[in-house]
Image: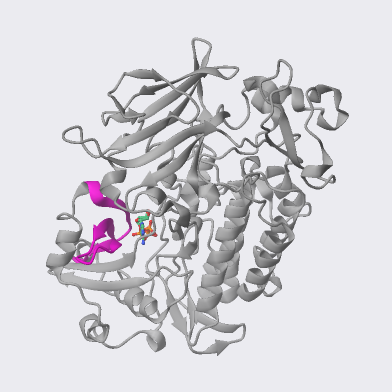
Amino acid sequence: MAPGAPILAPRVGMVMVPESHRPTIRVSDMLSGISLRYDYEELKVATRDWSKSRQLGSGSYGAVFKGEMEDGTEVAIKMIDLGALGAAGQTEDMAGFEEEVKNLSKFRHPNLVTLIGWGKHEQFRYLVYELMTGGDVYDRLLKSRKRDHPVPFLWCDRVSALLDAASGLSHMHNSKPKAFHRDIKAANILLDRHGTAKMADFGLSCTSSGKGQRGHQVKVKTISGTPGYACPIYARTGTVTEFSEVYSFGMVILEVLTSIPPATADPSKPGGIAYPIEAQLLPGSAGAVERCVQAADRTAAWPKGLPEDLASLGIRCVNASDEESRPRFVEVVRSLRLLLEKYPRPQAGTSPCHGSGYLENVSSQEMSQGSGPSPSRPAPFSLELVAADGLQVESLPQQRRHLHLMASGEAGGRLTAPVGRQYQQDLFESWLQNPELCSCISRLSFEVSWAPGPSDMQITAKGNNPITLNGHILARGDSMALDLGSEVGFPYSQTGELALFLRLRFRRAAAVEYLNAAVAPTAVLDFGEERLGSCPWVLRCSFVEGLGGEAALQPRSDPKKDPRCGELTSFFWWL
Ligand SMILES: Nc1ncnc2c1ncn2[C@@H]1O[C@H](COP(=O)(O)OP(=O)(O)OP(=O)(O)O)[C@@H](O)[C@H]1O
């Protein structure tokens, strides 16, 4: 599903739902009962005639396009080419169209992607979904590990996505008839613009009304699913149960904890598949929880204790030999909810859960040496959203109003931080309702540079689309000095009266950092207001594990002398 997904053969084979569960009516008959049929012309207009620029991705059965319907609703339209599938010996219901429409039409749940309607034209079938603009969990994990310009995917967003997805799956498994997704994987967990996760891609799903020895189950003739996620017992027997689904979800839990994919291309065998979770974490052997904790992706800034708790849950789900020892989805949901209660989201302003562009859990040593998962470093500035076309800024939570700059380069003794659609895509998309405006923001729109101190701040326009600084237009290559309070704008067009569709204010960051962050942050600091001695700012401590809140540590001019801040010195690289 995600671009660059490592899965080589997403579907091992095609679904064959057994006779007793197979619908006997033709697709066209069945769908006539579903009211939201869209005219082909409307779908064509919505996607600007299936413009390549509107393509969101493609799966086994065809491409998915972003569309805008007549009423302005943004949607994702999956196009299935039955001609191509027929040539490959596949039929209409094998393409998953019938199943997907039938199953999705039944479900209305906040954590299942909503099917808005459908359409057909010649050999094409169309599925119209709510648009999920936040990407998928697989892609988020990939982006969080990128060496250049990583986009943090922090622990609370990860656990919350797991809880959402498990809730959607639990709903399917507790509905009547019970429904099986059959392709649970990180790439099929999509995120909306607010970060809510929903299960997608029901092309393989099927229902069961009968109970077998192991509860509700469906025996399929051909095994399908995604390598690495598929339960080995299901792969052997062809019997889908809730437990086989929980196995796949357990793999997702371990993947979200460690950012290690369950399956990937095997570099040693052309066309081969490697199973990194199996190989590195040995989930079925003693010590698996410890290995998972060791492998926990530190860029997520896990709080102490959470990796153990999450690993234990994941390991229970992927018990390969005794499937009945796996929890049911309802238990998985409750366990994940308990984890979010046990480890509450830190408050805004000191939160390691600020999403896009936010500081990640790289240890202070890594930061000072510029090593570790990424060479990016938090800048002591941020850009605060002042206004965006079509958006009521006050409706956004505080933490979604800030673009936190990351210093990712150094030139001539100056640090630079990039801003643009390529770097803060999620944030720009969440600010701008109109995707065309979003695409007016260049991939690299501008760079902020400064001399360590920080002083002598400068902005340099880098994109084809101009920007403004305090009302002055800056074209590509233009630089201007930047002050705290300066306003950066994005103009609608270069001609006519200057009107801005997005305005951001340059401000000092409410910076946070986690010290001694081997796995969990032990302290959170932010810039205080005072200037003391030769030091331009004092770091005020908001939270230290075991010490409580802000009152526990007072601001001071020489943190080096305080034993409680042993690592603080390496934090001063930007001062
Ligand atoms: N509702 C949606 N909103 C936004 N993007 C979507 C939506 N549904 C799918 N996509 C995007 O379209 C791409 C293709 O999705 P699709 O479900 O067709 O295939 P897949 O699940 O990747 O592959 P396969 O069907 O072979 O498992 C995905 O990468 C996803 O990013």
State the residue at coordinates (42%, 71%).
Answer: 222
Residue lying at the far top of the rendered structure: 412
Quadrant of the snapshot with the N terminus: bottom left
Magenta-colored span: 53-82
The majority secondary structure of the magenta stretch comes to: strand
Residue 336 in the image: x percent, y percent?
Answer: 66, 64
Quadrant of the snapshot with the C terminus: top right
State the residue at coordinates (27%, 83%).
Answer: 34
Note whether 501 is above or below 57 in the view shown: above
Check if residue 389 falls in the magenta segment: no
User: Is residue 421 toward the left or the right of residue 370 in the image?
Assistant: left
- Is residue 157 at all visible to an observer of this figure? yes
User: Is residue 197 toward the left or the right of residue 86 in the image?
Assistant: right
What is the quadrant of residue 445 in the picture?
top left
User: Is residue 210 toward the left or the right of residue 243 in the image?
Assistant: left
Residue 87 in the image: x percent, y percent?
Answer: 20, 63
User: Is residue 146 toward the left or the right of residue 88 in the image?
Assistant: right
State the residue at coordinates (32%, 76%).
Answer: 101
- Colouring of the image: one colour
Check if residue 75 falls in the magenta segment: yes
Quadrant assignment for ligand 1: bottom left
Residue 376 in the image: x percent, y percent?
Answer: 55, 29
Of residue 13 and residue 493, the one placed in the foreground of this image is: 493
Note whether 391 is above or below 21 in the view shown: above
Note whether 223 is above or below 446 in the view shown: below
- Is residue 273 at all visible to an observer of this figure? no
Of residue 545 and residue 215, the one placed in the foreground of this image is: 545
Residue 318 in the image: x percent, y percent?
Answer: 65, 62
State the residue at coordinates (55%, 40%).
Answer: 358
User: What is the tally of numbered marks visible in this picture?
Assistant: 0
